[in-house]
Image: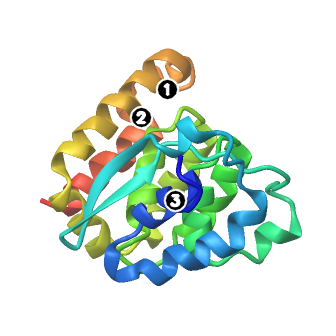
Amino acid sequence: MEQNSPKPFTQAARAAFPVANRALAEQAISHLAPFVDDADRKRSSEFSEFDVLGQNVRIPIRLRFLRLSATDMAMASLPQPALCLVSRATDGYLRQHAVASLLGINNAWAPPYVATLLADYVHEIVEVIHDGLPGLNRALYANLVRENRTQFRMLRVRATSYWNAYHRHLYPDKRDYPGLKALHEMERWAA
């Protein structure tokens, strides 16, 4: 890697928001830089693509943060764009805490982070989102679904796989699994 090229986290963060919202990425980078493990380059380069208001964004699959915990005071002071990136943390407690804070954001750049977590293997994270459905901005999520039908099919496949592998004993009927119920509801909003 060239000495002057951006670090993997910086590249991932910049690609994770619409170009029109570059300032949000820079804000997140400045707040999270002390906690980022840039040695974990592979994770920073894997992503899910979404279209947000006609612009392509690349949501990192996972990001590794060091010395950051869900109960840390630093976590409480993070701005919303940083919480979006923390929702991609390797630590499930960080993901769960972050997504709970993202549910009330009424900006088009936040819903991909929430929707992606409906296909997480940690059912407590999925339940937080399912329980928060009534408070979501339906128009934002409906638009996300309309712009990303293929991605939502992939989320449904992944959620079904995790239900089958890890959560079937809690939800014998997959139609009762919160991740699939929430995806179905968002798809209904987009109909």
**Contact flag, marks 1 and 2 (Cβ < 8 Å):** yes
Q: Residues within 10 Å of mark 3 (few under 14, many from 20)?
A: few
Q: Which SS class for mark 2?
A: helix
**Contact flag, marks 2 and 3 (Cβ < 8 Å):** no
- Residue nearest the viewer, comparing 44 with 69: 44
Pair 2/3: label in front: 3
20 above or below 11?
below
Q: Is residue 42 left or right of residue 20?
A: right
Q: Residues within 10 Å of mark 1 (few under 14, many from 20)?
A: some
For marks 1 and 3, the one nearer the N-term is 3
Determine which residue is flagged by label 3: 5
- Residue nearest the viewer, comparing 71 with 79: 79
Percent of width and height locating residue 32: 70, 66
Determine which residue is flagged by label 1: 171
Pair 1/3: label in front: 3
- Cα–Cα gap, marks 1 and 2: 6 Å
For marks 1 and 2, the one nearer the N-term is 1
Percent of width and height locating residue 144: 26, 63
Q: Quadrant of the C terminus?
A: bottom left
Q: Which residue does the image show at 34% across and 72% down from the upper left?
A: 18
- Snapshot quadrant of residue 148: bottom left
Q: Residue furthest front?
A: 3
Determine which residue is flagged by label 2: 176
- Residue nearest the viewer, comparing 156 with 84: 84
Q: Residues within 10 Å of mark 2 (few under 14, many from 20)?
A: few
**Contact flag, marks 1 and 3 (Cβ < 8 Å):** no
Q: Amino acid at mark 1?
A: Tyr
